Amino acid sequence: MDVIDFAEEERKIRALLVGAPKTDISELEGLVDTLGYEICRSVILNRMEKNPVYGIGSGKAQEIVSLAKELEAEIIIFDFEISPRKQRNWETLAKLPVIDRQEVILRIFASRAQTKEAVLQVQLAQLEYARPRLAHSYGDMARQRGGNFGAKGSGETQLELDIRKIREKIQQLKKELAQVVRDRETQRKRREKVPLPACALAGYTNVGKSSLLNALTGADVFVEDKLFATLDPTTRKLQIKSEVKGDSDAPKKGFSTHILLTDTVGFISNLPHSLVNAFKSTLEETQRANLILLVLDSSDENAETQYNTVTKVLEEIGAEHIPKIIVLNKIDKLKENPTMLAKITSLFPDGIKVSAKTHEGFEELSERICDELLGAEISCIIPMEKQNLLNDARKLGIITEENWLDDGVHIKIKGGELKKNPRLSNLIAPFVISE
C-alpha cells in the first residue's frame, strides 16, 4: 500500500511574479495569494520594449527564465496582459506555464463561483479569454482528422474543430445566462410591486462590504479576508429607525423604514473587460440602485488609489450619476494611529467613519442614508379635523418631527422627490408651509 505524503499534497505551487516598470506589484501578490500559490519572488522590470517576441529584450527574458529555474518556480505570472503569441513564446523559452494577471483573476473567480449565474458568467469569461490562446496548446498546427489535403468538414484541423466547439459553447452559455437574467428581472419586478429604495454596497475587493452588510442587516453572507470573497450579489432588507422629535406632550412613536441593501462583487484596478462584460447582469444591481455606499478600507494606505479605481469602474458601467455616500470602514483599526486617521479624514472629509466590527458610526450612516434616499424635510400643518391623514402620511413618507398645537399638527416629513412620489405629494400639497 502506497504511503500518502500529505506534506507533498499540501505543497503550494511556486510562482515568480513579474511587474511592469514603476508599478506596485502588491495587488498581484494579493491575487496570487488568494489563488493559493506561493510567491517565491517578485521582479519589477526596468523598462519595456516593443519586442514582438517577448515584449522585453531577449536577454532580459532569458534572465527571468534563469531566475525562475534557480528559484524552482513552477509558473511565471505577469502583472500585465500578454498576447497569445507572446504567451506561446514565453512558454517555449521557459518550459513552464506562463499566465498574466487576467488569467489569475479568472482562476480566482472560477474557484469561488457558487450560484448558477456566477458559474455561467465565469465560464463565459474563461472561454472568451481562451479562444485566441487556444493555438498555444497545439505544437503541430497541421494535424488532421482524416479527409484530403485542403478539404474542410471532417478534414478540419484539430485546432479549428476545438475553436468551433468553443464558439458553440459560448453561444450556449450566453443563452443560459440570458435566461438567468430574465429570471432575475422577474424577481426584481416582484420586489418593485412593494417599492423600496435600493442601496448598493460598492467598493474595492476585501474592504469589508460583506461584513458591513452582515452587521447592518443581521445577514450571514460569507466573509473571508481574501480578495473576491463575494461574487454573487446578496440583497437584504435594512430597517432604519429613529425617534420623532417634538415639543408637545402628545405621544409620539418612533419611525422606521426599510431599504434594500445589496452586496456586490468587489472592484479591482484594471478589471478585465471580459469580466466586466460577463458580470454585467450582476453589476446592474449597482446601476439600478438609488444610492451607492462607496466603501473604503480606512486603514489601507492605498485607500485613495482604491477610491479612484472604484469611481473609474462605476463610470465604465454607467453608474457615475448615482448619488454616493463614502463609507470609511474599519475605523476601529485607526484608534492607535492618529496620523493615519488625520490623513483619511483630510482625504475624505464627508466620509462616514464606521466599523463593521464594533458598529461605530452606524447611527450617523443611517441618518445619511435616510437623508439621501428620502430627500429634504418638508414642513406641513395638518388641521385637527384632518388628523386622520397622518396615518397615510406615515405610510407614504417618514415623519421626523411632530407637534400638536392649537392651529393643527405641525409635522416635518421626508418622502424623497415629491415628483416621484405623487401620492404623498397630492396628500400634503394643501398643507405645505414655507420655512
Image (spheres, rainbow, N blue to C red):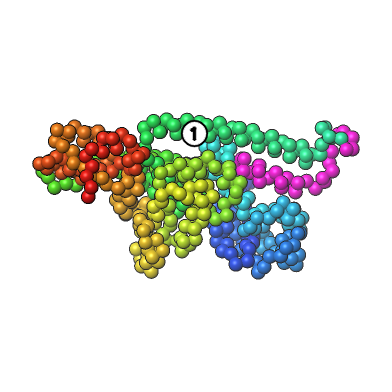
Residue identifier under label 1: 184
Q: Is residue 373 left or right of residue 133?
A: left
Q: Is residue 410 left or right of residue 89?
A: left
The residue under the point 73% across, 37% down is 164
Q: Is residue 389 left or right of residue 208?
A: left
Q: Position of residue 103 (x, y in %)?
A: 63, 50
Residue 117 magenta-highlighted: no
- In front of the other: 123 or 326: 326
The residue under the point 14% across, 36% down is 384
The residue under the point 66% across, 46% down is 129
Q: Position of residue 402 (x, y in %)?
A: 18, 43
Which residue is most to the right? Answer: 148
Q: Is residue 111 visible?
A: no
Q: Is residue 38 left or right of residue 161?
A: left
Q: Is residue 206 above or below residue 302?
A: above
Crowd band around label 1 with a 10 angstrom C-alpha radius: few (<14), some (14–19), many (20+): some
Residue 144 magenta-highlighted: yes
Q: Indicate the amino acid at tag 1.
A: Arg
The residue under the point 82% across, 32% down is 153
Label 1, secondary structure: give it: helix
Q: Position of residue 228 (x, y in %)?
A: 51, 49
Residue 342 figure quarter: bottom left
Q: Quadrant of the N terminus?
A: top right
Q: Position of residue 359 (x, y in %)?
A: 32, 52
Magenta stretch in the rendered image:
122-150
Q: Is residue 339 above or below residue 357?
A: below
Q: How many marks?
A: 1
Q: Is residue 422 visible?
A: yes
Q: Is residue 240 above or below residue 298?
A: above
